[in-house]
Image (cartoon, grey):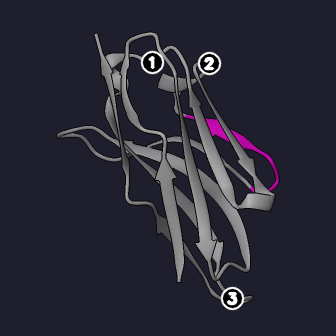
Amino acid sequence: QVQLVESGGGLVQAGGSLMLSCAASGRIFSIHTMGWYRQAPGKQRELVAASTSGGSTNYADSVKGRFTISRDNAKNTVYLQMNSLKPEDTAVYYCNADINYTFASRRDYWGQGTQVTVST
């Protein structure tokens, strides 16, 4: 079994910063893309940022220049540094990872979600 455990959410004032962490553990052969999604009330889940095993990153237009995704492959951990937070960033943030749990078997895994609330 593979688990993704997130941490770092919370309440912050507009303009503030938060860092989210997500650690993958369990039966892991290799990890491909790791990323962060978010879902605000009444809205669909959307991609925030992603990082491939080769080091490429991509971001939602709404967070470019404010959020930075990084990963520590030795720790199977992905981070999301969020700066200049806005009220519209308020959502539940989910970690996602594309993992080979054996040499030949691969699937997507999701974390449990962490709430980020940005107040005015």
Q: Find residue 67 and report its horizontal and vertical position in percent.
A: 58, 27
Inspect the magenta stretch and tell me whether residue 27 lies in it: no
Q: How many marks?
A: 3
- Residue 16 left/right relative to 76: left
Label 1: how many Cα within 10 Å (few below 14, some 14–19, many 20+): many
For this rendering, which residue is in front, 57 or 11? 11
SS category of the residue bearing label 3: loop
Pointer 2 with pointer 1, Cβ within 8 A: no
Which residue is rendered at x = 34% and y = 47% of the image?
45
Q: x, y percentage for residue 109? A: 50, 69
Q: Give the vertical position of 99 relative to 14 (above or below).
A: below
Read off the residue under disc 2: 65
Q: Marks 2/3: CA distance?
A: 37 Å
Q: Is residue 55 magenta?
A: yes
Instruction: From the top left corner, tell me how far across and down residue 100 is, in percent.
Output: 67, 78
Query: In the image, what residue type sits under mark 2?
Result: Gly
**Picture layout, residue 48 above or below residue 86:** below
Q: Look at the numbered disc 2 and give the secondary structure of its residue.
A: loop
* Mark closer to the chain start, 2 or 1: 2
Magenta-tinted stretch: 53-59
User: Which mark sits nearer the N-terminus, 2 or 3?
Assistant: 2
Disc sitting over residue 113 in the figure: none
Q: Tell me the distance, in whole angstroms, between the alpha carbons under discs 3 and 1.
A: 39 Å
**Left/right of residue 52 with respect to residue 2 in the rendered view:** right
Mark linked to residue 85? 1
Using residue 47 as the reference point, say whether residue 86 is left or right of it.
left
